[in-house]
Image (cartoon, coloured by chain):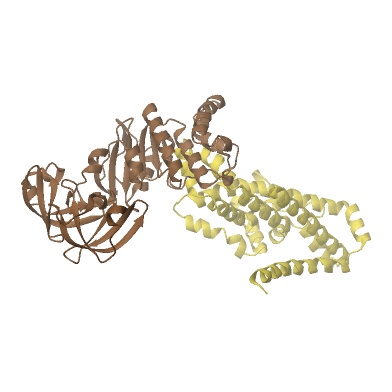
Amino acid sequence: MKNLSLTLQSGMCHVIVGTTGSGKTLLLETIAGLRRQESGRISFGERDISHLEPELRDVSYLPQDLCLFPNMRVRENICYGLRLRGISIQEAESRLQPLAIELDIAHLLDRHIAHLSGGERHRTALARAIISDSPLILLDEPFASLNLGLKRKLWHYLKDLQTKRKWTLLLVTHDLEEAQLLGDDLSLIANGELVDSGPKSEVFCYPETVSAACILGAENFLPAEFSGRSDGFCYFYSPALEAKIAVSQNYPTLTGDNSEKSCFKLGIRASDIAICGPDSATAIKGCIIDNIFRKGKTATLVLRCPQKNFSLLAEVPLADIAAHVPGDSVCIHIAPGTAMALIQS
Amino acid sequence: MTFRRAGIAVALLTFFIYAALIASLTTFLSFDTVASLFSSARTLHAIKTSVFAATLVVFIAGLVALPAGFALSRHDFVGKRVVDTMLELPLFVSPAALGAMLLIFFSTSAGIWIQDNLQQFVFTVYGIILAQFVAVLGVSVRLCKAAFDEVPTRYDDMARSLGAGSFTAFHTVVLPNARRGLFAAAILTWAKAMGEFGATITVAGTIAMRTETLPISIYMRLASADIEGAVGAIALLIVVSLTVLYLSRFISAR
């Protein structure tokens, strides 16, 4: 990891999203004191904890592999940290019971770890991480192997608790829905470097680089040339689409003086591309359907652009392409202001 | 024949090789021999000495092997590879040579001082314990290291991030999770100490009713052409050792 500077606000949930192998887990382990950083500083307010032993940092950590102790039962695992802090059995039990009920593990407290399912292990490990009310809680993909229903229930539960108890959470995830729901602030990491960081709404809506948009799930990136400003939009000409695309002129990368000279790529989300009729004023003509993947109420289209060596992914309502088959030519529409003006580096 | 059956057949074959050797003892073993062995104060003393020394050696070796095995398993330090290699010394140096090395040590000024001021080892029961300890220590450390290697270091990390100091993490998480491996290490150490002969006889000699363990007793009876007595002592060594080892495994499995 290099050139990484991150400030967590007390009482907020900071989410880190990044590509696989980008160093997210390494970052959490370094903060927890399980790995020594070669240089740099980690501090809690004014207190430098960079060289403290892990047990003195007062940081709770839920690792991706959970690391539940097989020699202990569920109850002992969850209360391990409390026991070390000298908290009485009654006090530990009074904290454990409501948490166990909420996480649906109250009936498992006397079971051995070996007898738990994957989801039950996850919930036990989550309980162990949050029961001690540490000033900083590090969660490494805490909901990764849970089914969607349980995952959503736990997101709400965790967010509610975090807000009420003003926990400072640093959460690593791949799941953008989880990041949007739980996060107050968001950081994006790729190849050991911080790509973007800031309030969730800004980072999600206005990624500034191709790497950031990639991490946030944008599917289409097209080279484009600046061609002018009008009506609150900056217009970019895309040779691949042989058309002009409108980007909001308030987009962060377009506000500087050199914006018109910079080299941009346009990022377009598959869900922002719609099928339209040939008469529409903003219709981009000449896209050929290469393939159609139907899924529930929507379909993903692979479109060949007018300039044949580019293809686009579009996610459209199933009804819009009911009459189409691969090989058909269609017109597409990209709503003004939905495209992202991304710096290439 | 499937691979599974072939494997089981070979496993049974190893059992029968040893079973045949044990069965052959019956050629020279009679009820009278066994009865006279059990009524002999000398034999009972040899059994007591053997079991007492081997059990004590397990505990003493454990005191050294546990921390040493843990350090070798968990930490990197200067000379770790040299220490690790040295653990094989008792395996490649013959037991008699190991005993001779001990005797030579006690002929040095440091050894003489120890014998004069601290404890007499040569030709005493303490010599048996020391010889067995030196003979089993390397294997014991190696087995403890293997047992700790089986416990992922992530457990130590996790315990520490939950607030445990390094020693608390060791005794609350690592040690309990390594217990099966450590128990196996203790059993093997005990068995090796029970059968130790070369180093023991070189350091402690063959003094009846004093430094006579069961393996030494077998040797002394063979040397005096007492075949029946030797066979009886072999049978005793086998029965005592197999009973203890089987019971330990039975208890551990429960």
- The image quarter containing residue A74 is top right
Residue furthest right in the image: B32
- Determine whether, in the image, residue A40 is placed left or right of residue A55: left
Camera-side residue of A98 and A131:
A98
Camera-side residue of A246 and A277:
A277
- The image quarter containing residue B95 is bottom right
Camera-side residue of A136 and B113:
A136
Residue B231 makes an appearance in the image: yes
Name the residue at 76% across, 68% down: B16
Q: Position of residue A156 (x, y in %)?
A: 40, 35
Q: Position of residue A56 (x, y in %)?
A: 42, 34
Vertical arrangement, residue B13 with respect to residue A298, above or below:
below
Q: Position of residue B85 (x, y in %)?
A: 53, 60
Name the residue at 44% across, 36% down: A55
How many marks the image carries: the answer is 0
Name the residue at 78% across, 66% down: B19
- Determine whether, in the image, residue B145 is placed left or right of residue A241: right
Q: Quadrant of the N terminus of chain B?
A: bottom right
- Determine whether, in the image, residue A316 is placed left or right of residue B97: left
Camera-side residue of B25 and A309:
A309
Vertical arrangement, residue A162 with respect to residue A284, above or below:
above
Residue A135 makes an appearance in the image: no
Q: Position of residue B96 (x, y in %)?
A: 67, 63
Q: Which color was chain B given? A: yellow
Vertical arrangement, residue A290 with respect to residue B252, above or below:
below
- Determine whether, in the image, residue B140 is placed left or right of residue B53: left
Name the residue at 36% across, 29% down: A163
Q: Which color was chain A given? A: brown
Residue furthest bottom in the image: B1
